[in-house]
Amino acid sequence: MSHRPFPGRRSVLRGSLAASAALTLPTALGAAPAFARSGRPGAGWGVQTGDVTADSGLVWVRSDRPARMIVETSATESFRNPRRFHGPLLGSGTDFTGTTRVHGLPAGEQIHYRVLLADPDDPRRTGEPVAGTFRTVPVRRRAGVRFVWSGDQAGQGWGINPDLGGYRIYDAMGALDPDFFLCSGDSIYADGPIPATQALPDGRTYRNVTTEEKSGVAETLAEFRGNFRYNLLDDNLRRFNAQVPSIVQWDDHEVRNNWYPGQVIADSDGRYTEKSVDVLTARARRAFAEYFPVSTLRPGAREGRVHRVLRQGPLLDVFVLDMRTYRNANSADDQKADPRGILGREQLEWLKRELARSRAVWKVIAADMPIGLVVPDTTEGGPNFEAVAQGDPGAPLGRELQIAELLRFIKHRRITGTVWLTADVHHTSAQHYQPSRAAFTDFEPFWEFVSGPLNAGAFPASALDGTFGPERVFVKAPTASNVSPAEGYQFFGEVDIDGDSAELTVRLREQDGTVLFTKVLQPGRVGQ
């Protein structure tokens, strides 16, 4: 692969941090230079970047007190002749978080940045800078693209375990030096308290880092914010955030297990005093927008959306779906007409338009739920279903009707290079969908790859639904339910697109980086 020969991000960051600590801080908001001293604003939650383009990126930080956010960028670690971007005033209205867009950057280059936090009453008083780095999107095809993906973090009561070294999977992902990380949802478990200890089957004890906000289910805005802060207690994640930009989507556990719009929590669930899921969703969405740099969301704004397309140069477009906000209620999912489906009509039409206008060699459809894997919903009793499939291998019914419409559109518009990536089911697998095996046949073959969890309970492989003819080519999953991270079964995936041949290679990996399965796909084909 002709991937760009950049230095490893770890060495870059070590140098940047050392250099930043040794430098005299530059002028803050027009004031004279000052050295970082105690009592200044601090950024102990680290930095992160998101939704990077060819000439821009979103830089995120959280302060420990009111502060003015300032970002400096440079082509080198020395920060000689840096460019300065004045960001927002960070305060309690956004839980002291803020995002600044840095722009006018060179395409396909390593960008060094550092965030300064200035006292809003005295711009001379600035905290110690916090450094990071990212690569802008290339405009040349031969540059190649590499990224990693996974989801499902701090679920089922399995949190940051210091005995295991915390979220070690981030070190394995960072070692691949990816261009970005696609987080496929369930970035937190707002409905999953984390106790100090949990018993393991062999008699050992799993120990968790705990916080007040993780002692119960999240209902208030403060509790949702605390759930996002919890993960940032992990050193591995903060280090990864500073070296790899993210593309983030959400699923159910950012709010509550298996939620849908308009849902009312049953009185029998005594954990919740707020019974309106719409109220909980509004609070969760606000915290999500505060804690992730997402280009289509603004903290505190009622408008905005999670679904979007991120163009990663000539080789790749990433279509981020939102299979939560517009879906219908979970049900037996066997209706013969379903105009709303799992995406909603407006999002479905948006996706069709964007796929049709894409000129990228590969179109990754980032779905927060799988297509042909049966995911039951037992939260309200009855044979309800949570994803697309309902276990009936016949003609499309319910939410399958919307997916059938999309697959038919892709075939008849001769859209090439579609690949589906997802997480959600807490195991890793590769499914090939083939019309000759299917009840619905008006589509071209395609692949769906599943990876996760990042740090949560692992579960047995889901049953397949034959409507779209899936064949499970590879799977690794435990035979028992809710297997802890101490026992393994934590996974991520890697996508590597070669700049010369444009071949796309998918590797499914264990948490230490061991490759479990590899599939190479050829460019320019409608289906394969």
Image: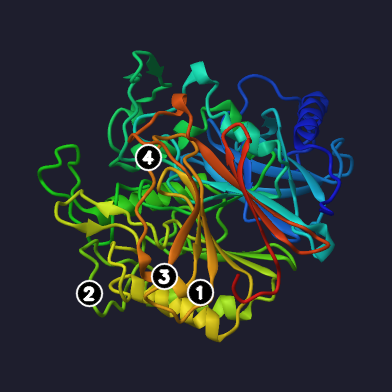
Between the C-alphas of marks 2 and 3, the distance is: 17 Å
Answer above or below: position of 163 versus 93. above
Number of the front mark, 4 or 3? 3
Which of the numbered marks, if any, corresponds to residue 459? Answer: 4
Between the C-alphas of marks 1 and 3, the distance is: 20 Å
Q: Nearer the viewer, residue 352 or 235?
A: 352
Q: Is residue 383 left or right of residue 348?
A: left
Which residue does the numbered mark 3 point to in the structure image? 468
Residue 527, quarter of picture: bottom right
Answer above or below: position of 229 versus 58. above
Decide which of tag 1 and tag 2 comes sooner along the chain. 2
Decide which of tag 4 and tag 3 comes sooner along the chain. 4
Quick check: can you spot residue 37? yes
Residue occupying the far front of the picture: 436
Q: Nearer the viewer, residue 90 or 335?
A: 335
Residue neighbourhood size for the residue with mark 3, other residues' Cα within 10 Å, grouped as few (<14), some (14–19), many (≥20):
many
Which residue does the numbered mark 1 point to in the structure image? 351
Number of the front mark, 4 or 1? 4
Residue 482, quarter of picture: top left
Between the C-alphas of marks 4 and 1, the distance is: 31 Å
Decide which of tag 1 and tag 3 comes sooner along the chain. 1
Q: Secondary structure at mark 2?
A: loop
Q: Secondary structure at mark 4?
A: loop
Q: Is residue 424 left or right of residue 506?
A: left
Q: Which amino acid, by three-letter code, is at mark 2?
A: Gln
Q: Which amino acid, by three-letter code, is at mark 1?
A: Leu
Q: Which amino acid, by three-letter code, is at mark 3?
A: Phe
Image quadrant occupied by the C terminus: bottom right
Q: Secondary structure at mark 3?
A: helix
Query: How many discs mark residues in the rendered view?
Result: 4
Which of the numbered marks, if any, corresponds to residue 335? Answer: 2
Please name the colour scheme applied to the rendered image. Answer: rainbow
